[in-house]
Image: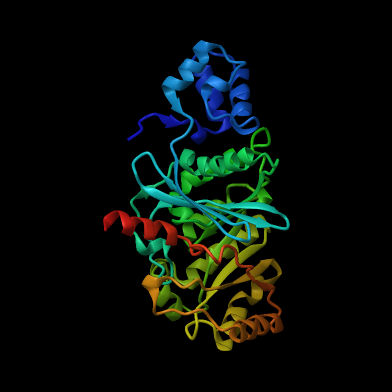
Amino acid sequence: METKQSIYGLTKDQLTDWFLGQGLKKFRATQVWDWLYVKRVKSFDDMTNLTKDTRDLLSEQFVLGTLEEEIKQESKDGTIKFLFKLSDGNLIETVLMRFSYGLSVCVTTQVGCNIGCTFCASGLLKKNRDLTSGEIVEQIMKVQHALDEKGLDERVSHIVVMGIGEPFDNYDHTMAFLRIVNDQKGLSIGARHITVSTSGLAHKIKAFADENIQVNLAVSLHAPNDELRTSIMKINKAFPIAKLMEAIDYYLETTNRRITFEYILLKDVNDHVKEAKQLARLLKDKRHLSYVNLIPYNPVAEHNQYDRSEKEQILAFYEALLKEGINCGVRVEQGSDIDAACGQLRSKQMKKQQA
């Protein structure tokens, strides 16, 4: 396994401190940052305004890339799903999606997931380890390099931290990642163009509220009452809805920023009008800063107890929320002709390797 640290894991301040610690000038860190994220070179040798000794020192201390592309699936709608192999052989997924407002990348934060949502492909394989901040940043860089190679002058403009794993279960590395990609002298991806999704780790939601960062927050809710939510999301045992809502109230009071509630519609499980009305009551006092994102379910073979809700049922649920004054919408689906559900491609490849 690679023992050198990925240079992509350093924030600008950490890189500056490293150069100063080596007895080198502070401006050298600015030069390297520019090579990494503006010129986007793939080798230290390409950093031509550095001395050879400095380039050699960087090569001795750091690696510039640890991810290898294993599989790339391209959808007819422009969605691209990447399966990357890490330096220790583990596999992760990253997805590029095209929207009218720009190019969005969904990144993974853990190898596997321990949250255990019963409908999710990501949790089919238990957490092996957290990703480092460098491995999360490099997902963005690998996608951006792939775009650069096409010569179309396209750039990643949005990020969703919604891939495999629970970002707030890997809190420190996730926060470092956010600060690296948000840096205005680097990739300069606006904080309001970045969304982090959590399954509801209440204490981390409070910590995130105190970060003084403009990054958007989404909460995977998926049910409006404890009995139903616990049956599909075991995290609800540790952080039941009352505890979760207390943390969300703290977040809203502290940041005054809108929060998105994600709600996957499972046929005849959580998609009735009665659940819509319960959800509306739950969010009533937060509706001025809330948005409900209704998500059609992507069936997963291993979770065959669930089916996709009928269009009529989705519409009825949506209209019931609107009637109660809840801002909501139905997510536009991307990559439906490839392994669209998060974790599906990785799970399939792991099975092939084990066969």
- State the residue in front, 209 or 348: 348
Q: Quadrant of the C terminus?
A: bottom left
Where is residue 302 shown, x and y percent of the image?
36, 71
The answer to which image quadrant residue 67 occupies is top left
In this view of the protein, can residue 23 be seen by the observer?
no
Residue in the foreground of this view, choosing between 241 and 307: 307
Q: Is residue 341 visible?
A: yes
Q: Residue 340 vs residue 283: left or right? A: left
| Display coloring | rainbow
Closer to the camera, 124 or 256?
124
- Residue at the location (36% across, 33% down)? 2
* Placement of 130 over or under 22, stated as above or below: below
Residue at 73 percent of width and 58 percent of height: 100
Percent position of residue 273, x then y: 59, 87
Who's the residue at 54% across and 83% down the image?
271
Count of numbered circles on the image:
0
Which residue is at a point 58% across and 47% down the rendered structure image?
A: 211
Which quarter of the rendered picture does the N terminus lie within?
top left
Image position of 354 with respect to 60: above or below = below
Image coords of residue 8 (percent x, y)? 51, 34
Q: List x then y, in percent, for residue 318.
A: 65, 80
